[in-house]
Image (spheres, rainbow, N blue to C red):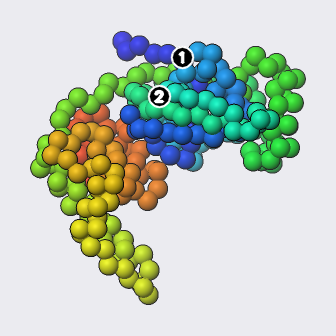
């Protein structure tokens, strides 16, 4: 039986892949508590794409597959300590086995960007007990990394699909003013992202897919892929012009 552990969960409007960097600005009381707890522990929490079809006590619910984020740096943005800036790095992906709801339900008309909203949540938290967790936690099972190689033929095929998609988008995004994108210009884009290589890895596929995705939901199937064959197939689906 696979080993499980309980970690804090941070639902976000993005997909974090293993070994990708993710800077975050944290300002909500519940996530400041999450960061504080992580800094007192092993510095790790789970990043999951928001599941728009579900909620947990009124808060954004996570998709069931996410990635462990390890905090490498944490500092106050301002002297008042109301905002934190953290730098993180993606580690293993994981599957949620059980969600542990936060102690606080989302207040009616809660505004996460307002001082009033923060004060309201903090007041409720003090009444319940500041030792209780305001953020979602989950019992998770780590997913083994894909250790298969990416062939150069497979990589070049994905590059060609990506180029065709970007060229098609430029021509069709504004029919009244179609834009022409040169294939050589796209080679420069690949150079900027260090994606010109004769020895591609899984990380190259993740980065190329991110360049070709319009919305984060398109990347979730790649994170959930458990073999190189499935990963390449999902990437092809993402990059193929519909």
* Residue shown at the point (27%, 50%) measured from the top left: 195
Vertical placement of residue 166 versus 201, above or below: below
Q: Residues within 10 Å of mark 1 (few under 14, many from 20)?
A: few
Name which of mark 2 and mark 1 comes first in the sequence: 1
Quadrant including the C terminus: bottom left
Tell me residue 140's x, y (percent). Answer: 48, 22
Mark sitting on residue 42: 1
Quadrant including the N terminus: top left
| Residue 34 visible, this orientation | yes
* Residue shown at the point (55%, 21%) measured from the top left: 43
* Residue shown at the point (17%, 54%) measured from the top left: 156
Quadrant hosting residue 203: top left
Quadrant hosting residue 86: top right
Q: Nearer the viewer, residue 90 or 3?
A: 90
Tell me residue 160's x, y (percent). Answer: 21, 61
Residue corresponding to mark 2 = 68
Secondary structure under tag 2 reads strand
| Total tally of numbered discs in the picture | 2
Q: Is residue 36 found left or right of 222 in the rendered image?
A: right
Tell me residue 38's x, y (percent). Answer: 60, 21
Tell me residue 121's x, y (percent). Answer: 81, 34
Vertical placement of residue 150 versus 134, above or below: below
Q: Nearer the viewer, residue 218 or 37?
A: 37
């Amino acid at each position: 039986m696979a080993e499980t552990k309980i970690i804090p969960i941070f639902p976000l409007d993005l997909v974090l892949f293993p070994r990708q960097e993710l800077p975050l600005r944290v300002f909500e009381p519940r996530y400041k508590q999450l960061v504080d707890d992580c800094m007192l522990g092993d510095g790790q929490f789970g990043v999951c794409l928001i599941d728009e079809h579900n909620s947990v006590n009124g808060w954004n619910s996570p998709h069931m597959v996410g990635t462990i984020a390890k905090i490498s740096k944490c500092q106050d943005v301002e002297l008042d300590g109301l905002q934190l800036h953290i730098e993180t790095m993606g580690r293993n992906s994981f599957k949620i086995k059980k969600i542990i709801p936060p102690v606080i339900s989302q207040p009616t008309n809660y505004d996460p960007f307002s001082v009033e909203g923060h004060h309201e949540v903090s007041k409720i938290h003090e009444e319940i007990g500041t030792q209780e967790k305001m953020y979602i936690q989950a019992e998770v099972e780590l997913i083994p990394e894909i250790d298969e190689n990416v062939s150069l033929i497979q990589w070049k095929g994905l590059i060609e699909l990506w180029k065709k998609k970007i060229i098609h988008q430029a021509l069709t995004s504004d029919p009244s003013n179609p834009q022409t994108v040169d294939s050589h210009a796209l080679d420069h884009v690949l150079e900027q992202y260090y994606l010109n290589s004769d020895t591609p890895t899984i990380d190259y596929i993740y980065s190329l897919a991110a360049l070709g995705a319009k919305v984060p939901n398109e990347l979730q199937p790649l994170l959930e892929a458990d073999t190189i064959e499935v990963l390449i197939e999902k990437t092809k689906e993402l990059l193929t012009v519909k």
